[in-house]
Image: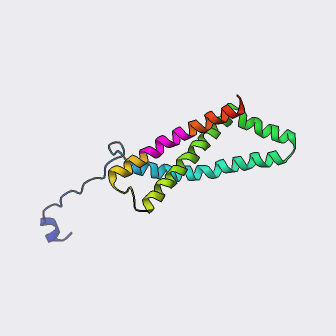
Amino acid sequence: MSQSQATRAPAKPRPLSPHLSIYRPPITMTTSILHRITGAALYVGTLLVAWWLIAAAGPQSYFDFVNGIFGSWFGRLVLLGYTWALMLHLLGGVRHFVWDAGAGLEKHTASKIAWASLVGSAVLTLAIWVVGYYVRGA
């Protein structure tokens, strides 16, 4: 260390980045992350739908096996999650389409649209499942 560096006043400490425990991510960031996660989850869910369709084209015993898995409580929970992921990803895509058109980019409006996509995905998922059970007669 040279003499001039030793006599120099200590540098002002740089601020630390906010830690996750005190940082509250904005809703637009949260929905953007969820959009990416649901996009990845839809790949897996679509493979499950393809498995069911392939089983439907096969022997009755294999279809009954696959249909039994999807009809179990765990299978229905997975399908419920797939439905929600599909609806959230759909509404997130619409949200990004609106933004690409140059509308809704103000911070307050973008936050409202993000909340609307979260609430809308839950409402649409519930509506799809209610209608599904009503049509099925169960």
Q: Position of residue 30 (x, y in %)?
A: 43, 48
Picture layout, residue 14 above or below residue 71? below
Picture layout, residue 71 above or below residue 1? above
Residue in the image at 66% along x and 36% along y? 132
Q: Position of residue 83 (x, y in %)?
A: 60, 43
Residue in the image at 75% along x and 45% along y? 52
User: From the image, which quarter does the C terminus lie in?
Assistant: top right
Q: Nearer the viewer, residue 135 or 19?
A: 135
Q: Nearer the viewer, residue 79 or 13?
A: 79
Question: In the rendered image, is residue 55 in sight?
Answer: yes
Q: Nearer the viewer, residue 12 or 44?
A: 44
Question: In the rendered image, is residue 37 in sight?
Answer: no
Q: Residue 125 lies in magenta, yes or no?
A: no
Q: Name the image colouring.
A: rainbow
The magenta span reads 115-124
37 left or right of 16 in image: right
Q: Residue 117 lies in magenta, yes or no?
A: yes
Residue in the image at 61% along x and 39% along y? 128
User: From the image, which quarter does the N terminus lie in?
Assistant: bottom left
Q: Main secondary structure of the magenta part?
A: helix
Q: Quadrant of residue 124?
A: top right
Number of marks drawn: 0
Residue in the image at 49% along x and 49% along y? 34
Q: Position of residue 50 (x, y in %)?
A: 73, 50
Q: Position of residue 111 (x, y in %)?
A: 37, 48
64 left or right of 86 in image: right
